[in-house]
Amino acid sequence: MEISKKPVFAKDGTEEVFRVIKKRVNEIVRELEPQRRLEITLKAILFPLMYVAAYVVALAYGQNLTVLYSCYCVMGVMLVIIFLNLIHEAVHNTLFRRKWLNALYIYFFDLMGANSYIWKVRHTRLHHNYPNIMGWDSDIEQSPLVRVFPHGKFSGIHKYQHIYMPMLYPLFLLNWLLVRDFKDYFNRKKTVWKIIRIPAIEYVKLFLFKALFLFYIIVLPKLVLHITWLQAITAFCIMIFTASIIALIVLISPHANTENEFPLPDDRLHMERSWFLHQLYNTNDVREDNWFTRFFMGCFNYHVAHHLFPHVHHVFYPEVTRIIKEEAEKRNLPYRSYPLLITLKNHYLLLKQNRMPENIFEETM
Ligand SMILES: [Zn+2]
């Protein structure tokens, strides 16, 4: 068998099961689409307005620091809500029927500080195609300070990662916005460079949008409200810390925990399972499901449905998940769902488990 340039999934006969599920999913989406379109459009307008409104109130009444800090906290919450409900859908081209409208909408992400071009590549082409595969899933791959993959490069500091990482989690977005995006652009050893060459215009946009973001989020309030630099930066940190914690709860729970596998391709880059089975073994759902998770949290709890059908909008995931569950049960295939607190506990256990190189860990258990 030839050596492939990217991991290749096996053909193991489960493709037919996926075809059956896909057919049922297409039918239900077609049926529900007219009545759910309003909710999709409403969110696309309402959530950005809430973010802008919080910013305007901060600029108007922020001399009162309680108002300023509260507004920035709301903006942190809205950042995650916009990311989950809108940006994430737009990168998958599901927010609007027209592709160009999705492409345009994604710039909201740049306005909120993250680089949309590189995240789209990381998320749709690496994370979705190769979830939990070391060297390919760049969403799971984070700073060298943390060893999430059991086969990841080990350094002495990882021994304490289960202690210091939870304390560093409020800095997650600070790292994303001010360090990680730049690393992906300038360090050609980063995973994204395995599949793309970044066009020159994207470098220009990177710097322009980062400067614009830092200007309106820190400099403008400082100038308009006549507050100190420390107060302006504190407001920014409140926003980032709030967003980081909510974002991490959502991002960690479906993949980075001990209930999921982290399989490696063989030396010819061939994977043991089919793409369909790979998603079932490496993604779990979160059991909590209510009006809040559906309307505000972008149905993040239905993550298996998202991995199998990234081109279907999240408003359909409750029904899509019912189909996946039924078909998986019929054939004894894994469909897994855990309470949120259990997934977070299992994430902590994963950090603890990977704090040592595998052999040492086994010996000391
Ligand atoms: Zn996605």
Image (spheres, rainbow, N blue to C red):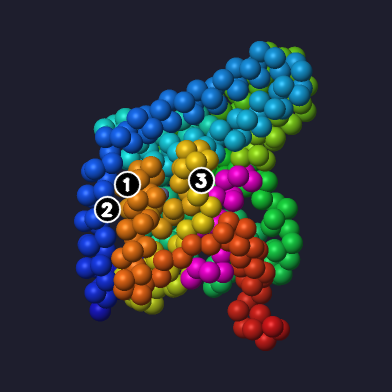
Residues under numbered marks 1 and 3 in contact, where contact means CB atoms less than 8 Å apart: no
**Mark 3 surroundings within 10 Å by alpha-carbon count, few (fewer than 14), some (14 through 19), many (20 or more):** few
Mark 1: C-beta under 8 Å from nearest atom of ligand 1 = no
Q: Nearer the viewer, mark 1 or mark 3?
A: 3
The residue positioned 56% from the left and 20% from the top of the image is 53
State the residue at coordinates (76%, 18%): 64
Residue type beneath disc 3: Asn
Q: CA distance from mark 3 to mark 2?
A: 22 Å
Q: Is mark 3 within 8 Å of ligand 1?
A: no
Q: Which residue is mark 1?
A: 312
Element at label 3: loop
> Mark 1: which amino acid?
Val
Q: Are marks 1 and 2 in contact (CB under 8 Å)?
A: yes
Q: Give coordinates of residue 5: x percent, y percent.
A: 32, 65
Q: Quadrant of residue 65?
A: top right
Q: Earlier in the sequence, mark 1 or mark 2?
A: 2
Secondary element at image label 1: loop
Q: Quadrant of residue 146?
A: bottom right
Relative horizontal placement of residue 8, taking residue 172 as reference (left or right): left
Q: Tell me which segment is drawn in magenta.
A: 244-261
Return the residue at label 2: 25
Residue 203 belongs to magenta span: no
Q: Give amino acid for label 2.
A: Val
